[in-house]
Image (spheres, rainbow, N blue to C red):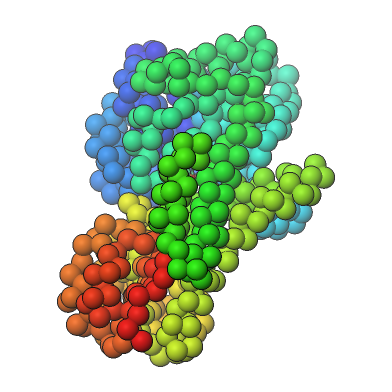
Amino acid sequence: MNSLFAKTILCIGAGYVGGPTMAMIAHKCPQYRVTIVDINADRIARWNSDQLPIYEPGLDEMVQAARGRNLFFSTDIEKGIRESDIIFVSVNTPTKTFGVGAGMAADLQYWEKTARQILESATSDKIVVEKSTLPVRTARAMERILFSTQSGIRFEVLSNPEFLAEGTAVKDLEQPDRVLIGSRLTESGIRARQALTEIYANWVPLDRILTTDIWSSELSKLVANAFLAQRISSINAISALCEKTEADVTQVARAVGMDSRIGSRFLNASVGFGGSCFKKDILNLVYICRYYGLNDVAGYWESVIEMNEYQKTHFVMTMLNAMFNTLAGKKIALFGFAFKADTGDTRESPAIYIARRLIEEQADLAITDPKALVNAKADLKDVEGKVRFVEDPYEAALGSHAIAIMTEWRQFRDLDYERVYQSMVKPAFIFDGRNVVDHQKLYQLGFNVYPIGKPALTHL
Ligand code: UDX
Ligand code: UDX
């Protein structure tokens, strides 16, 4: 069976990164056999069903077309390792919750376990590709494990970080700004790098496939996420100043972003960034800087996270102050729970923090989100009974004192706000944590409107 295919590719870890990335390789390269394995049997069962474990526009179609042809999902990790030429590793590397570096460093236990599994099951030479985001110099640790026996099997470790963003994963994979491949600069390292380049060259122009030494590649991934998050914290810091000075953060961002040296993207002020990567990767960067004694450098990057925490607290304080310093017993509808639009993912979503703070204030919460209610329920399991989860935004808003927009779903922009307003307790408040609705129009309907980084529009 394997001989029908030019290459056999394995991916360990069927998550947000591994699943879509491998589906794209299978889609673009029918000549390769691609298998994805995971220790989580439920997850694999879902990848083999009509209800994929993650929602990404365009993903269902791609998986359905390739599954069973050259894309396979399985729990047999050993067999997968034995039969593959190239192994991508995209198991999770969460922030450590215990011991040295707790709350900061990456927890590499799954990573190390996977390296040992590869060593135990391999019966032929392998190229092992780091797909997960890792601390710089993890490849060295991986090599130490893989080279620790006299098996005669040769392993080459490459770094190939993934830059896809959730909600646009398929597009990002199909037309990446760049594909980054880091290797050892030895003859065999460069040969392995070429083998990986060949895969991507099936659909990515060669001038977008960037090859570097392995440490630069590992570090670049952390730095790219840190820079993106830093832009958001920078504009969010300015949004607080705008609220005090009657400047408008959208206008400021436009004026600043038109400078081609700065650029316009990632300057949307918000209630704060979320997602599984930004905070984790910056904490990781901070930890590494401290490890090397670079305390000032660590402090600089840490402030990006501090600013993000401030932004969430500031949002709750704005709500509290506007609503006469008490939220107790008031009905509040949270519009959106996902960390951004077009995904059901809620990891590190600012909505989690804000929901908890509002519950502490004894507000009566109703949460609505088109894709994230299942995750929202899991995130708020410990406060079960204190919050309702509602499919329909009109129903969530019914009888409420305030709406707080957490996620920039298109649906929320297009609601009939006249109807929403009529169904609410007066004075009715709307706090737009994403600057997505038409503030002037809502104000004219009667709402007291509190955007991010713009003067509030109130009738009070
Ligand atoms: C993960 C990391 O969080 C990120 O840093 C990295 O860049 C890519 O991998 P993601 O795909 O979003 O991102 O994680 P997740 O959706 O949690 O998927 C990881 C998968 O690995 C899970 O399905 C988990 O069951 C699996 N896994 C974990 C294994 O198969 N083996 C293990 O030993 C541990
Ligand atoms: C990010 C990186 O973009 C991606 O390259 C990397 O591989 C993984 O981490 P992701 O977390 O999926 O991707 O989403 P992203 O679009 O970067 O948004 C992250 C957070 O920042 C979201 O909460 C989003 O709402 C917020 N954001 C983004 C803003 O608040 N303002 C902006 O201008 C842009």
The answer to whether 60 appears left or right of 226 in the picture is left
Closer to the camera, 296 or 350?
Answer: 296
Q: Position of residue 149 (x, y in %)?
A: 73, 23
Q: Position of residue 232 (x, y in %)?
A: 51, 52
| Quarter placement of the N terminus | top left
Closer to the camera, 235 or 39?
Answer: 235
Q: Position of residue 348 (x, y in %)?
A: 50, 59
Quick check: 42 above or below 324?
Answer: above
Closer to the camera, 81 or 181?
Answer: 181
Quick check: 390 above or below 30?
Answer: below
Q: Is residue 4 visible?
A: yes
Residue at x 33% of width, y 48% of height = 55
The picture quadrant where one finds residue 393 is bottom left
Residue at the outermost top position: 187
| Quarter placement of the C terminus | bottom left
Quick check: 303 above or below 87?
Answer: below
Residue at x 35% of width, y 26% of height = 26
Closer to the camera, 313 or 5?
Answer: 313
Residue at x 45% of width, y 78% of height = 319
Q: Is residue 377 visible?
A: no
Quick check: 210 above or below 293?
Answer: above
The answer to whether 119 appears left or right of 200 in the picture is right
